[in-house]
Structures are given as C-alpha cells and as structure tokens.
Image (cartoon, rainbow, N blue to C red):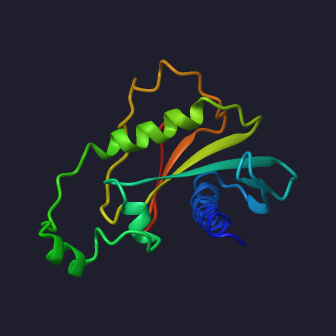
Amino acid sequence: MTEKEKIEKATAEKFLKLYNTKFNTSYTIKELSDHPDVLCEDLNGNKLSLEITLTEDCGNDIKALLGRSEHKNLAYVKEHGMGMARDFVDVSENAYQRIREKMCKDYGANVALVVRDVSPLDWNWSNVFDKKLDDIKNPFEKGIWILTCGNPNKIYQVL
C-alpha cells in the first residue's frame, strides 16, 4: 500500500466512524480507488464513495508531518532564526482552495468530499464557508466535510 493510500484509508476509517454514528449507518471500506479515492458500502448494499484531500494551517505543514520538511523541527528553527510563533494565514482560505480544486471535477453519484484538517489546533469549522461556495456547482451529493485531527476527531459538514 502506498503512503497516499495509507493516508486515504486512515482518513476514511476515521470519517466513517463519525459519519456512521451521526447518521446511524454502517458503511465500511470496500476498496481503495483513484477517482474517487475510497469506495464504501453499508450492510444493505448502499454505496458511498469518498474523495479525500488534506488541508493545513500553513504551507509545508503536511510535508512536515510526513517527514519531508524540517520547518517545524526545533533544531532547524533555531539554526535558521525563525521563531516558533508563525503568522497563520486564514486557515479557512487553505481549505477553501482545496475544496474549489476538487469541485471542478465530476466524481459520480453518492460521493462525499472529505477534507482532513491536519492542524493540531481545534478549529471550529461550523459556518466557515457560508455563501463562499455558492457560486460553484457542487458535484458532491453526499456533502463536503471537514474531518479534524483533534482528540476526539470531529466532522463538520460545510456544504
């Protein structure tokens, strides 16, 4: 299994646990795919597909979590004179850009977009995108969701 597939599978598992609880459903992963990323099915044979993407507070945060960037490493920060406190861009703008990129494609029926927020901070994603996505045709009939990585994980339906 590739690193990408491991991330998508782990994201789908966390999302489905919360989604199933919220809607009293029983979806499980049936297959990892490419377009959309994860194919799911419930006990009654109903289908749900997940397209998965990640969002971050600041550029390179995802790379740092995967061990591909030193920008969050304390030794690197000390050596390069960068303070640990960083100016955060509007984190919702990063998520918005990821969502817009995905909304330009057609993934078929019964698909949800799951945006995994890799932030260690517990952002409240409720009502963040009010009206902001109204100008784009939404191809995700099962919704657009933010999955937080906090403890506990949470899901927010943003559209």
Residue at x 65%, y 30% (from the top left corner): 139
Residue in view at x 44 percent, y 37 percent: 97
Q: Quadrant of the N terminus?
A: bottom right
**Residue at the top extreme of this rendering:** 135
Depth check: 158 or 5 in front? 5
Which of the pair 36/14 is nearer the observer?
Answer: 36
Q: Is residue 103 above or below residue 42?
A: above
Residue 62: which quarter of the image? bottom left
Left or right: 98, with 19 as reference point: left
> Residue 130, how many percent across, how many down?
38, 29
Left or right, 55 with reference to 107: left
> Percent x, y for residue 151?
40, 71
Q: Nearer the viewer, residue 141 or 22?
A: 141
**Viewer-proximal residue among 135 and 67:** 67
For the point 65% across and 39% down, the residue is 142
The number of numbered discs placed on residues in the rendered structure image is: 0
The residue furthest front is 80
Left/right placement of residue 135 relative to residue 102 reads left
Figure check: 42 above or below 69: above
Q: Is residue 42 visible?
A: yes
Judged from this view, the residue extending furthest toward the right is 45
Find residue 158 and report its horizontal and vertical position in percent. 47, 38
State whether residue 150 appears in this view.
Answer: no
Q: Position of residue 132 (x, y in %)?
A: 40, 26
The residue under the point 28% across, 70% down is 72
* 114, above or below 76, in the image: above
Is 30 left, or right, of 128 in this rendering? right
Query: In the picture shown, does residue 142 fall above or below 8?
Result: above
